[in-house]
């Protein structure tokens, strides 16, 4: 079984973007009716079947944890009410995809974060996403400002209400920023990777998992710069009087969104296999075909299959075993589906 | 011959920090006399001989490009006049070290950058550093704000006067930020690496080397996240209609400040040897001994010696050949010294 823990709904029907444009044009007023972007089930099927599902079939991915388009979360736009309405709509859509193809998609939720607003305001949508929509994962943006980095580190107590709810539900968070509105940072070529590195170092400096021993955070894009600089992080932890970063790896996992063989070889050489989750970030930042190999850059299964640093048992962990452990609501969903089809 | 292209004077006599503290306490007034931090030659020798030079001897480093302490540049503090006085003092000190030990140190200069101030204001100090102090390299801070990233990308025309002078002198710049005053970013565990990644992506997006075909920029700390995510950068360049990032590698070089074997193995597997410069960032961010190996994390020569991805000829390029090409004023200095000692 192959589970991709990091896919975004980047091919949503055009009504979604149209509604969002109207919402942003109307910031400061009541805005358009959230019930308005009417998208039929057939339109949703047409949005995923020839795109996401086709790629999953081609690459042998059984199931994807599917969340709203990360760069469109854009928490920096508007205020909490704007983010709140937008999150509900986006979460409802990925929920519907996961209902139309329950064996192929499980839902990841976005949160209605807004810069300078107490993260606890996200709790109602987090609870709705898990309890009513069946979310198995949540995307947490460590920089709702979109590249100004005005939020406190993830170890700050202002984030704790979210962690308490995640622990209560046994749901992990993927630490994932959104669009950069800072011209210094290209969104997918700098801001995403910087956020991954930044978040990990915040966790090295802090002691978050003493307070939340069962919390799991997934750091996407192969952990940004972290595995490549693992010696640096080990040395910094030593200098700071912090435990070796390897001690974080029961709570922190890295995905395999690294788009060439040497990168995946490094990741699997440095990071224990129990802390690596298969993913491609499909359909995402890098959609092209590598002219050197003839294959898509983001077809990460090829690299994971080929890396010499995983035994067959470890490869099975990376492909599915770890995901079933880290996303217990996903495991329960799969078990329920299997039981239902056996009846 | 082994040249380390990236060392900082982090063990300067205490008078330097004392003067700086007085300067910062007096911001808004004329400040203390720049001639005041009187440091004798004996004090300077005592500051480098049992520290920097001892490590260079132990590790077999013949010569280090030695620049002022990066985290102390702190361009965000005070205004241009503050940065200007501070740069002169710091540059004078590394110049004196390079004069006391002319075969072991060549000078790298800092610039009196200040957030929101035209980079062209740095030209007088850049010219003084090269013409009067013999600087062979310059450190250029892409984020003088210290973690707010308010400066435009390095491809913006406001930086061009500096590039024109660097091309005129045939002097490369190392792209190196200073202290982060943003609590989200640990200085050496996040901000430094993020800056490296950010700068490279700015160069992928822009077309700087069409305007400055002979300009060389050194991206330190192994290029941040870039070599680990080389496939991502290749795919993004393709999507943006930009040339393959490999075409940047005549103008952009990465140093070897990556503090474990797998990281150096990746760097030397992915990046052509002509674009890799030996360095340790000694005495720098990570000073400890790895309890697993019994060696200093930042003793990068061990990793470069051991990597299987360099032939002997390529290893010689990384250790010295590339540096002599990229820092022609260093090559000229070494040739002058050799000629003088032969007379």
Image (spheres, coloured by chain):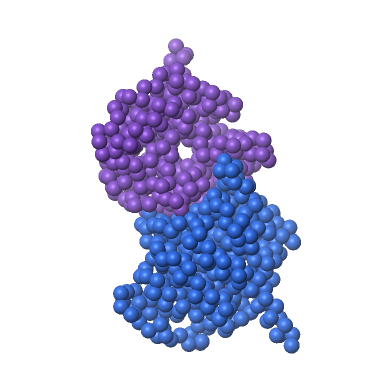
Chain colours: A purple, B blue
Find residue B300 and report its image quarter: bottom right
Q: Residue at x 25, y 33 (%)?
A: A30
Q: Quadrant of the C terminus of chain A?
A: top left
Q: Between residues B299 and A26, which one lies in front from this camera angle? A: A26
Q: Between residues A93 and B228, which one lies in front from this camera angle? A: A93
Q: How many marks on residues?
A: 0
Q: Is residue A26 visible?
A: yes
Q: Residue at x 66, y 71 (%)?
A: B328
User: Image height check: is B204 above or below A109?
Assistant: below
User: Image height check: is A251 above or below B53?
Assistant: above
User: Image height check: is A192 above or below B209?
Assistant: above
Side of A47 where A299 appears, left or right? right
Q: Is residue A171 visible?
A: no
Q: Residue at x 49, y 75 (%)?
A: B125
Find residue A106 and report its image quarter: top left
Side of B176 where B27 appears, left or right? left
Judged from this view, the residue extending furthest toward the top is A343
Q: Quadrant of the N terminus of chain A?
A: top right
Q: Between residues B216 and A340, which one lies in front from this camera angle? A: B216
Q: Residue at x 42, y 18 (%)?
A: A41
Q: Position of residue A108 (x, y in %)?
A: 41, 32
User: Image height check: is A254 above or below B4?
Assistant: above
Q: Position of residue A38 (x, y in %)?
A: 36, 22
Q: Position of residue B256 (x, y in %)?
A: 59, 60
């Amino acid at each position: 079984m192959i589970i991709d823990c990091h896919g975004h709904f980047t091919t949503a029907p055009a009504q979604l973007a149209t509604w969002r444009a109207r919402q942003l044009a109307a910031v400061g007023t009541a805005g358009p009716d959230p019930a308005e972007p009417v998208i039929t089930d057939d339109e949703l099927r047409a949005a995923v079947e020839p795109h996401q599902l086709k790629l999953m079939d081609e690459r042998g991915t059984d199931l994807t944890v599917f969340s709203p388009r990360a760069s469109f979360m854009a928490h920096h736009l508007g205020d909490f009410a704007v983010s709140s309405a937008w999150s509900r709509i986006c979460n409802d859509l990925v929920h519907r995809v996961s209902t139309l193809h329950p064996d192929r998609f499980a839902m990841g939720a976005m949160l209605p974060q807004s810069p300078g607003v107490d993260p606890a305001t996200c709790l109602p949508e987090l609870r709705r996403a898990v309890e009513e929509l069946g979310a198995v994962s949540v995307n947490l943006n460590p920089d709702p400002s979109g590249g100004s980095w005005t939020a406190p580190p993830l170890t700050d107590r202002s984030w704790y209400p979210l962690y308490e709810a995640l622990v209560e539900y046994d749901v992990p968070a993927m630490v994932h920023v959104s669009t950069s509105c800072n011209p210094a940072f290209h969104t997918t070529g700098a801001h995403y990777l910087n956020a991954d590195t930044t978040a990990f170092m915040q966790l090295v400096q802090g002691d978050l998992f003493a307070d939340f021993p069962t919390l799991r955070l997934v750091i996407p894009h192969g952990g940004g710069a972290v595995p490549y600089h693992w010696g640096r992080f080990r040395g910094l932890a030593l200098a700071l009087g912090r435990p070796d970063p390897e001690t974080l790896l029961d709570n922190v996992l890295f995905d395999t969104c690294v788009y060439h063989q040497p990168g995946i070889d490094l990741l699997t050489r440095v990071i224990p296999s129990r802390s690596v989750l298969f993913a491609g970030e499909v359909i995402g930042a890098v959609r092209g075909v590598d002219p050197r190999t003839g294959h898509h850059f983001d077809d990460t299964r090829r690299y994971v299959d080929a890396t010499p640093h995983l035994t067959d048992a470890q490869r099975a962990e990376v492909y599915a075993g770890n995901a079933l452990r880290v996303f217990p609501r996903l495991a329960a969903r799969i078990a329920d589906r299997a039981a239902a089809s056996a009846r």
